[in-house]
Image (cartoon, rainbow, N blue to C red):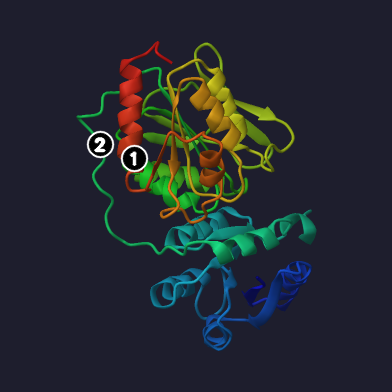
Amino acid sequence: MTVSVLIVDDSPTMRGLIAATLKRDPDIEVVGYAANPMEARAEIKRLNPDVITLDVEMPGMNGIEFLEKIMRLRPMPVVMVSTLTQAGAEVTLAALELGAVDAVGKPGPGMTTAEAFANLSNIVKTAARSRVRTASGAPAPAARGADYRAGGDHILAIGASTGGVEALLSIISRFPANCPATVITQHMPATFTPSFAARLDRSCAATVQEATDGAPLEPGRIYLAPGGAMHLEVAGSTPRCRLVAGDTVSGHRPSVDVLFHSVARSKRPCTGVILTGMGRDGAEGLLAIRQAGGHTLGQDEASSVVYGMPRAAFEIGAVERQLSLSQMPDAILDLCAARSARAGTH
C-alpha cells in the first residue's frame, strides 16, 4: 500500500528536503504541500492524505494549535518535524501528548539531511498504520498510596518507543512516592530526554530524572535513559545505573534489549514491561527477564499506538500477561509489591 503524505512547513527549503527524503521510498507518495495552517486545512480536505508531517513553528498558528484542531476535528496520523533545541523538545513533547504519532528533528549544525532524516520514511509508514489517539483531557485516576508496600530490592524496567510518551505519562503519573526503583528506556533524540524526564517528574509523586552513571536504584526514584550515545544498564551488587558506550542494539541506542538483559542478570526480584513501539527492541531482553524468574507484562494491541515491540515479545513467549494501558499501573505495582515481599524467590 502506498502511503500518501502532505508536508506542512513554512520553509520552502525544508519542504523540499522532507519531500526529497520521502520520495526515495517507493511506498510513499508526496501528494501535496502547505506553507501554513490555512493552506494545510484546505489541502487535507482536498487530498485526504494518509499522514501529514507538521512543522512546530509556522506563521498565523503554530503547529501545536493546529495539531489540537486536527485531533479534535479530524483525527489522523501526524509526524512532527521539530528543531533539536530545548524549546523545540518541550513543544514536541506537548504534541506527542496531544496525539502526534512521532517526531523527527530537523537537521542541526554539523548534521546532514541524511543523518537527520535517516528514519523519516519508516516513521511515516509506521504512522500510517498506527492507531490515532487523542488526549482525552480526563484526569488520571488517583495514584496508589497506602495499599502499596514498597520493597527495597525490586527493580522495575520499562521499554517503549512510538507512542511511548503518552503511555509512560499514563503509567508514571499513577505511581506513589514510594514506587519501585524504576529504569526506563524510551526511544527519542538526546535533546528530548531531559525535557521528557522533567515532564514525567512533574506528573509523578516519585522523583524522575535522566539516568546518570553510578546513580543508585532506590524506591521512589525513576531513571530515564539519556537519548543518544549511551546504553542504560543496571549493574553492581548494590544495583546502580550504568551508562555504556557501544553500537546500536536492535537498531537503537539506548536499547531496551540492553536494559532488560542487564536487569535479568541482576539476580534481583524484577518486573519487565514492554510498551507501544515499532520494531522488536526489547523482545529478547524481556524473555531473559522471564526466564530469570521475573514477571513480564506487555501492552495489548488495542491500546498500543503501534503494536510492534509488544507483539514481537508476545510471539516469542516473553510476555506473561498482556494488559491495556489503563490496567498497567495497578498491575505493575501489584507485581512489584508481591515480588518484594517474597525476596529471594527470584
Q: Amino acid at mark 1?
A: Pro
Above or below residue 238? Residue 225 is: below
Q: Position of residue 307 (x, y in %)?
A: 51, 52
In the rendered structure, the answer to whether residue 280 lies left or right of residue 169 reads right
Pick the front one: 214 or 85: 214
Quadrant assignment, res 148? top left
Q: In this image, 164 relative to 140: left or right?
A: right
Q: Give the residue number, with chain letter if any, for mark 1.
A: 329
Identify the residue under disc 2.
144
Identify the residue at image location x=38%, y=62%: 135
* Residue 83, visible in the rendered structure: no
Residue ID at (58%, 72%): 52
Q: Give yes or no for contact between labels 1 and 2 (Cβ–Cβ under 8 Å).
A: yes
- Residue 8 versus residue 310 in the image, above or below: below
Viewer-nearest of labels 1 and 2?
A: 1
- Name of the residue lying farthest toward the left: 146
Disc 1 to disc 2, C-alpha distance: 9 Å
Q: Residue at x 67, y 59 (%)?
A: 122
Q: Is residue 90 visible?
A: yes
Q: Is residue 70 left or right of residue 22?
A: left
Residue 224 shown left or right of residue 190 in the figure: left
Disc 2 packing (10 Å; few <14; some 14–19; many ≥20): some
Element type where label 1 sits in the image = helix
Residue 283 lies, in percent from the top left, at: 57, 37
For residue 1, above or below residue 283 = below
